[in-house]
Amino acid sequence: TLPTKTGYTFGGYYSGTNGSGTLYYNADGTSATTWKLTDATTLYAKWTAIPYTITYTLDGGTNASGNPTTYNVESNTITLSAPTKTGYTFTGWTTTDITTPTTSVTIAKGSTGDRAYTANWTINSYTVTFNANGGTDVASQTLTYGDKVIQPAQQTRTGYTFDGWYTSSNFSGSAFDFSTIVASDVTLYAKWTIIPYTITYTLDGGTNASNNPATYNVESNITLSAPTKIGYTFTGWTGTDLSAATITVTIPKGSTGDRNYTATWTITIYTITFNANGGTDVASQTLTYGDKVTQPAQQTRTGYTFGGWYASSDFSGSAFDFNTIVESDVTLHAKWIPYTYTIRFHSNDGTDNTVTQTINYGEETALTSNTFTKAGFG
């Protein structure tokens, strides 16, 4: 009778251990050589470990690289690693004697027999969250692997243009492709581009303030400055959202749409006052911008020659030019040049026979008591 050993195949009897030496009996028990027993002889059975197969049914998954496909009775204890499958979670192995999926499966040293393991999976669920960044709120979506995100309705936001959904909060890369199969939780961020609006000014010959902008957007907060126009007073803006001329116009944050503003003006009135400085009184004149001062009639003053009208009371600079267009209230001052007189004092035969003095009109003159001397006279 041939010997047996669990997990091994009998390979015959040899004179040495582990199949060394001379083969005396074949694995089927037949004699392998002619020999005569002359004294006590020990023959050793040769045993070969049987290779067993391990078969895996992965249902589209990928086996772990360390999971063997064979083993034998001498193999160290084997613990199977988890396989992977995109979009699925591994829930365990089943086999003939393991009916409930088990994630921890071992093949103990000394085990025998072919084995077959089937991987079990549950499909993954993913949450897609939408950050509208100030746009219309969008409900999150729960998807299973293989599903595609349902593209939300076109987004709107006052003062902005919608530029797509992005997976990065800084909008790097390309916009999200809604034909993409989702394989993880995702947050999508709405990208917005602010809309520039134009501001048009109609100035009727005026000059706009340098800080009045030509454009604005929904984030701007603007107060218009007054324009200027020589000879005119600004009386306000008319135009967008204004029912009457308004000096202080604001475009508050949150406003939208192109805007048009027209400057309104009233012509400035100037008063010209004449200071005759002792001459003939001259009535003041009221002018509007662009008018010229009417030159008064020739002035007269006893003892003086008229020297013209001056804008400065000290008569500095040039005389006023009546061809000048007035741009402010003005006081004109009459300049007078007094007549000059020569007075000669005769000594009547005294010393310094004649003394001459020059005086202006209205001035007084006198001689000192010792101006003249004469012998014998006091």
Image: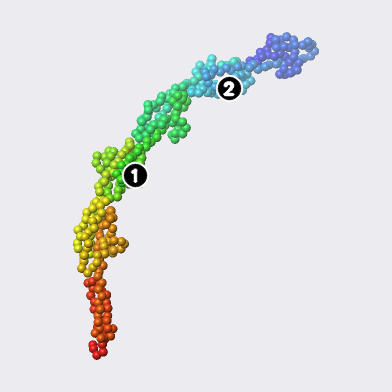
Helix, strand or loop at mark 1: loop
Coordinates of residue 228 in the picture (x, y in percent): 30, 48
Residue for badge 1: 212
Residue 35 to residue 311: above or below: above
Residue 305 appears in which quarter of the rendering?
bottom left
Residue 143 appears in which quarter of the rendering?
top left
Residue 331 to residue 87: above or below: below
Residue at image point 61% right, 19% down: 70
Coordinates of residue 294 in the picture (x, y in percent): 23, 56
Residue 71 appears in which quarter of the rendering?
top right
Task: Decide which of tag 1 and tag 2 comes sooner along the chain.
Answer: 2
Q: Is residue 123 visible?
A: yes
Helix, strand or loop at mark 2: loop
Coordinates of residue 152 in the picture (x, y in percent): 39, 26
Residue at image point 70% right, 16% down: 46
Callout count = 2
State the residue in front, 336 or 172.
336
Coordinates of residue 336 in the picture (x, y in percent): 25, 66
> Label 1 is placed on what type of residue?
Asn
State the residue in front, 263 or 123.
263
Residue for badge 2: 67
Colouring mode (rainbow / by chain / secondary structure / one colour): rainbow
Q: Judge left or right: residue 216 versus residue 123.
A: left
* Quarter of the figure that contains the C terminus: bottom left
Residue at image point 22% right, 72% down: 362
Task: For marks 1 and 2, give the one nearer the viewer.
Answer: 1
Residue 162 to residue 368: above or below: above
> Label 2 is placed on what type of residue?
Asn
* Quarter of the figure that contains the N terminus: top right
Distance between the alpha carbons at the discs numbered 1 and 2: 76 Å
Q: Is residue 112 visible?
A: no
Q: Judge left or right: residue 223 versus residue 24.
A: left
